[in-house]
Amino acid sequence: MADVMKDLTPRGNSGVPNGGVSYWYTSTALPKYRAPLPGDRDADVCIVGAGLTGLWAAYYLKRAQPDLRIVMLEREFAGFGASGRNGGWLSAELAGSRALYAKTHGHQGVVDLLAAMRGAVDEVIAVADAEGIDADIAKDGLLHVARNRAQVERLQETIEYEKLWGATDEDVVPLTLAELNSRVVVDGAMAGIFSPDCARVQPAKLVQGLAAAVERLGVVIYEQTTVEAIESGLARTDRGVVRAPIVLRCLEGFTAGIKGQRRGWLPMNSSMIVTDPLPDSVMAEIGWSGAEVLGDGAHAYMYAQRTVDNRIALGGRGIPYRFGSRTDVNGETQDWTINALTTLLHDMFPAAANVPIAQAWCGVLGVPRDWCATVDLDHETGLGTAGGYVGSGLTTTNLAGRTLADLVLRRDTELTRLPWVGRRVRPWEPEPLRWLGVHAMYTLYREADRRENTPDLAHTSKIARFANRVAGR
């Protein structure tokens, strides 16, 4: 085992410690590397990528069939990617167009999928409790706040939309400004929505705890091992070949690094900042005493949580995409993004304006061309995959991992009949069209947000509606 990795937080022009994978690892210490693949190996199941999707699949496979030989391959360390960098929303939100899911399985199929997502929130909490994983989990729900008239209109549309797909009055609760302020005071807020189906999580603690749990079950995780190609029956790496009748690709935003997958799932960039612990005087003004996670109604939306030690961790898209599907270096993000997120933080919480930013970081999430997640296994080739969570993946990984396990074991279950199983989507456009399209889309969204932040506009900007059509969302 290698020594604990050194701190990787260089300072850019913003003056904020930047990178180091994520603050979640800074607060817990980066893990020691596990040993790399020691040469060619045989297995029953080979899982490429030791993030949450692969770890959950391994966990449920081993619980169902303990004698399976499962090998996991990871270029860095388990949880190095989005699994250890995300905003810590264990939510029931499902990315993508429900109408697209319904094309194959009808309205009821989507209702079933959404119900399964709500159940997955409690499943993760139950497994964490059973395995002794202390991940600062608190199920206090999710708040979405509207800060202009157009966002208020969209919140009402959201309530109606959720109920169309099976949500009850308890699943999506409209909040008056007074009710919202009783939970958290956001400057400029006008209204809100509350959903109980969400918990705050410390992502690095969750993924590291799950990795330890699957090892206790007998799964072997090889790190410092780069998978160069995935073929029927094998995964080729820089350290040897793993042969297995089932090979599962669980790489999410890093999928483009595999040969032949450059135009599959686009690696969308998302960045975060976290403050120092807030003084009592600031907390008294903000009033965020619970563990609700927080989002807004903007098109270029933000996401936030109050950490267990009273920091605000806030994220957003920043500069959304690097040319050629490139990814970040150890979580380091751009100064422009740090400054933009800091400005947003201070705009929403003026009382925190004098609290230093402790760290900034970023990561990539997987975005399919139609923005809908997929779980798939072809038993003829033995090749399977899950991902395309579009930023709503923390809970989705659990549901996807359980579904993959059922598919591998050839079980006909409620999970394997969900409408995201076996989906096929067209590839992204080649460069430079891919880069131009993504950046144009977010430029339009930001312009739509700017226009909606004027008193005269009470409805969603036509610019945003146009961007949605171009993006295929």
Image (spheres, grey):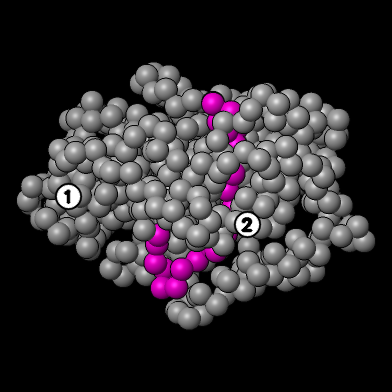
Q: Residue at x 50, y 66 (%)?
A: 321
Relative to 258, say whether 313 is above or below: above
x and y percentages locating residue 129 in the rendered image: 43, 19
Q: How many marks?
A: 2
x and y percentages locating residue 116 in the rendered image: 54, 36
* Badge 1 or badge 2: first in the primary sequence: 1
In the shown orientation, is residue 199 left or right of residue 30?
Answer: right
Labelled disc at residue 244: 1
Of the 4 image quadrants, the one containing the N terminus is top left
Of the 4 image quadrants, the one containing the C terminus is bottom right
Which residue is identified by label 2? 340
- Point out the stretch of residues depicted in magenta: 306-328
What secondary structure characterizes most of the magenta part?
loop
In the image, residue 308 lies in the stretch drawn in magenta: yes
Q: Quadrant of residue 173?
A: top right
Q: CA distance from mark 1 to mark 2?
A: 46 Å
Neighbours of disc 2 within 10 Å: few (<14), some (14-19), many (20+): few
In the shown orientation, is residue 166 left or right of residue 81?
Answer: right
Badge 2 element = helix
User: Please, which residue is most extreme toward the bottom here?
Assistant: 432
In the image, residue 113 lies in the stretch drawn in magenta: no
